Structure formats: C-alpha cells, structure tokens
Amino acid sequence: MSLIHVLNHLKKKYEMSIEIYPISLQAKGNFNNGEILENKPIGFPSDGGKLKPYSNLFYWAHAWTNSKKSTIGLHPHQGFEICSFVLKGQINHYDTKQKKWISLSQGDVQIIRSGSGISHAEELMENSEIFQIWFDPDLSKTLNNEATYDDYKNDEFELIESENRIIKIIKNSNSKMQIESSEIIIKEYDFKKEHRDNVFDILNDKIHSFFILNGNIETNNQELGKGTFFKVSDVNELKISLLSDIKLFEIISPKKPKYRTYASSMF
C-alpha cells in the first residue's frame, strides 16, 4: 500500500470517528407554551432528533428560560439517574423524598437516582439555563433500590488551572459525586484563545461526548459553534483550534457498558 493510500485511510478513519450534531440536527422541545425551550442532542425516540441513545447516555437536553420563570410540575421517574447541571442562573427543585423546595445556582449539580420510583418538580428562574442528562444504569439492580438524591455545590468540584485553561472535574473516580452508571467521567473546560491549538487524549473503549457551551472551535476541517454537540471515539487524540475563548462540556462513557442498558433493549 502506498504512502498516499495509508494517509487517505487514516484521514478517512479520523473523519468517521467524529460525529457532529449542530443545533439543526438536535431534537426540539418546550414546556408551558414556550416558557422553557429545549434543544436535545440525545432526545427520546419519539422526539425525531438525529442521534439516539448510546453507551449509558439515554437523554441529554439543553433547556433555558428567557425573561420569565417557569415550572415543570410534579412527574415520576424510575430506574434512571437524572442529573441537572445549572449552567446559568438558578433552579428550584422539589421531590417526594426531600418534600421541600431546594435552590441550585450556577455551577451546581443535582442527581436523582430514581431507583424504585420518585416524583419531582423543577422551576427554572428567569434567564436560567441547564443540562438535564439521564444516565442509563443497570436497571436489574437499580429498580430494586430506594430512590436517593444529592446536591453538589459548585465549590465542591476540583479545579485544575494552567496558563490558558481551567478544567472543572465534576465526576471521576476520586470525586465526591456518585453515579451508579458505570465508567462515567464529566469535565467542563474554559479555554483562552491565546493558546490556539489543543489536544484531547481519547481513551480506548470510550466515547467522548462534547457540547460547546460558548465560543467557536475548528476541528476535522470544520468550524463548530455554540450549541454544537459532537462525539469522538476510535482515535488516539482529538485536535481542536480555538477561534475564540470557549467553554466546553465533556462526558466520557463506555463504548460497551458491562451490563445490558435499557436503550440496548429498546433498539
């Protein structure tokens, strides 16, 4: 095989291992006649988005309010782990285990391990923004557990600072946050554009899922902007060039969880 064929093969492999989902390919949703709006990188099967559940990621919604607060009324969950990440502003939360309203602010994280069943309500205050992400644990175990709930405040997370970036470690093997869904790592990055070229190590047998919270990057000869979701696997590294200051959210999850997920039984 000639050098040109080898290079073309490697280029093709790299391009195929990055899947990019701009806002136009994400499912849409809303509550209360548009008081809460959503883009869903990973929607429910009925939502019509391009990307379906994978790994042990079942659902991923980016939701926000504008000038008016709005409440999603009491509704049930079972089995899944429901995580809310407050990206901006404030939310209030009520569930049938705590039996009181609890406030969460920018940078805070909430997890509901819904187990055998729990109901909750959420209020997004005006000009607030969240991720709600459902993790898909081993339901053969979690459905037998009592529901549990934890809040993690922004200042509880480890920050790793260098000259051009800050990495917030939300979940890894040493963090305070506990998730029953296996092999989950969650990070948030703040990059300064002065250091233009950056490289992410891509772990074997893992999928790296990224969401651009702010700014613009270039990767794989494409410019990607705010709200773009992309997933990477089967390469050793991901190279990105900063076109501005950026804020990036990442979840690392297993390509093949060691248990049968609910999503795998659906599809």
Image (cartoon, helix red, strand yellow):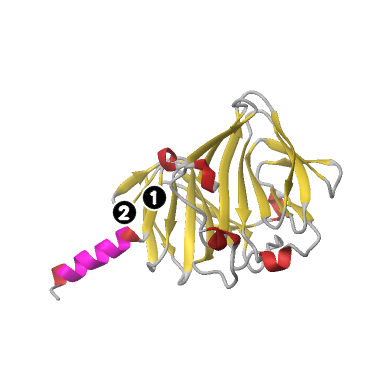
Crowd around label 1: few <14 · some 14–19 · many ≥20 (10 Å): some
The vertical placement of 204 against 103, above or below, is below
In contact (CB < 8 Å): disc 1 and disc 2: yes
Q: Which residue is mark 2?
A: 220
Secondary structure of the residue carrying numbered label 2: loop
Q: Residue furthest front?
A: 266
Residue nearest the viewer, comparing 221 with 76? 76
Question: In the rendered image, which quarter is residue 180 located in?
Answer: bottom right
The numbered disc on residue 20 is 1
Secondary structure of the residue carrying numbered label 1: strand
SS majority, magenta:
helix
Q: Is residue 261 left or right of residue 206?
A: right
Q: Amino acid at mark 2?
A: Asn
Q: Residue furthest right?
A: 99
Residue nearest the viewer, comparing 74 with 5? 74
* Span colored in magenta: 5-15
Q: Is residue 108 left or right of residue 254?
A: right
Disc 1 to disc 2, C-alpha distance? 10 Å
Residue nearest the viewer, comparing 101 with 214? 101
Q: Residue furthest bottom?
A: 1
Q: Position of residue 189 (x, y in %)?
A: 52, 52
The vertical placement of 69 against 78, above or below, is above
Question: In the rendered image, which quarter is residue 116 located in?
Answer: bottom right
The reply to whether residue 194 is visible in this rendering is no
Identified at 13% across, 73% down, the residue is 2
Which of pointers 1 and 2 lies earlier in the amino acid sequence? 1
Looking at the rendered image, the quarter that the N terminus falls into is bottom left
